[in-house]
Image (cartoon, rainbow, N blue to C red):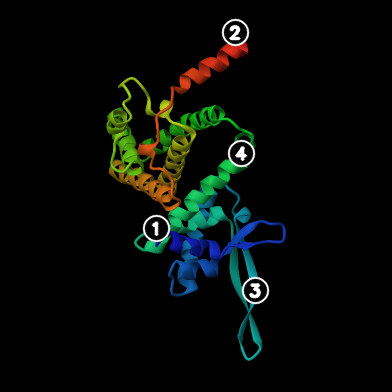
Amino acid sequence: MNAIRISVFEKIRHTGLEGNEYWLARELSQILEYSEFRHFLPVIEKAKQACRNSGQVIHSHFEDILEMVNIGSGAKREISDVKMSRYACYLIVQNSDPSKEVVALGQTYFAAQTRAQELTQLSEYQHLRSEDEKRLFLRNEMKNHNKQLADAARNAGVVAPYDYAIFQDHGYKGLYGGLGAKDIHNRKRLSKSQQILDHMGSTELAANLFRATQTEEKLRIDKIKDKNHANFTHYEVGKKVRQTIKDIGGTMPEELPIVDSIKKLTTGKRKKRLGNP
C-alpha cells in the first residue's frame, strides 16, 4: 500500500524544457489533503524560511508563477502557483501536519529521493567502481556528518557523552528494528573494541549516512532544544529510513553481512603511497 501511495508524488512530478524536474504547490497541497490552497501558504513560507536557514538560495527551489486555468464556458482566469524543486518539496512535507499518513509517506519519499539525488550528483562518487572505493568514500562522509550531527545534537540539548550515546542508540534502534549499538555488536559478532561503521559494506553505510544527514537537518529545521525530543527525532528518522528500505525491497541493515575492517583498506592505500608492496 505504501508503495502505491508514494507513487502519487511521482505522478505529479513535472519535467521542464531543459529536463529539470519540478512540482506545483497547488497539486502537492491536494495530495497532502489541504482543503484550500490558502491553508497551504503558511507551510510554503515555513519551508522557505527553512531553506534560507540551511544556506540555500530560495529562488533556486521556489519559483512564483502565474498560470491560466479554465473556469468554465471557455473563460480563463490567472492564478498564482509555485514551482518547487525536490528539495523544496522535502522542506514542505517536513513542515506539514505530521499526523496525516500521506505527510509521513511524503517525508519518507522526498527525504530518500533527495539524499539519493545528492549522492548521484557527487562526481567523485559517480566515478567509483569498486566496493572498497565506495566504502572508503562513504565512511569518510560518515565521519564528517557524524561531527555535524554531534553539533546539531549539542544544540538540541544533548551535551553529556552519556546522553550522546543514548541519542545515537535511538538512531540505531529506529534503523535496525529495535536493535541498539550493543545488540548490533552481538548480532554481527563484533568485539567491544570494533566499531560498527568500520565493518559495514557500502549499502549499510549509505543507509546510516542517510540517517545521520536527515536527523541533523531535522534537528536544525525543527529547532529542537530538548534531549528527549532529540532522541525521539533520531529514532523516527531511522525508522523512516528502514521503511524506505522495506518499500523498495532492500535487505534490512541487521541482515547485511559484516566485512573486514575498513582500516585494512586505509592501511593498504598508505602502503601504496609509500611505495611498499
Residue at the disc numbered 4: 122
At mark 4, the secondary structure is: loop
Q: Is residue 121 above or below residue 135?
A: below
At mark 3, the secondary structure is: strand
Q: Residue furthest bottom?
A: 73
Q: Nearer the viewer, mark 2 or mark 4?
A: 2
Q: On the rendered image, what quadrant is the N terminus found in? A: bottom left
Q: Amino acid at mark 1?
A: Ala
Q: Earlier in the sequence, mark 1 or mark 3?
A: 3
Between 225 and 142, the residue placed more toward the observer is: 142
Q: Are marks 3 and 2 in contact (CB under 8 Å)?
A: no
Q: Nearer the viewer, mark 3 or mark 4?
A: 4
Between 202 and 46, the residue placed more toward the observer is: 202
Residue at the disc numbered 3: 67
Q: Is residue 220 above or below residue 47?
A: above
Q: Earlier in the sequence, mark 1 or mark 4?
A: 1
Mark 4 surroundings: few (<14), some (14-19) or many (≥20) residues within 10 A: few
Q: Amino acid at mark 3?
A: Glu
| Residue 276's disc number | 2
Residue 150, x across and y down, in percent:
40, 33
Which residue does the image show at 52% across and 45% down from the upper left? 115
Q: Are marks 1 and 4 in contact (CB under 8 Å)?
A: no
Q: On the rendered image, what quadrant is the C terminus found in? A: top right
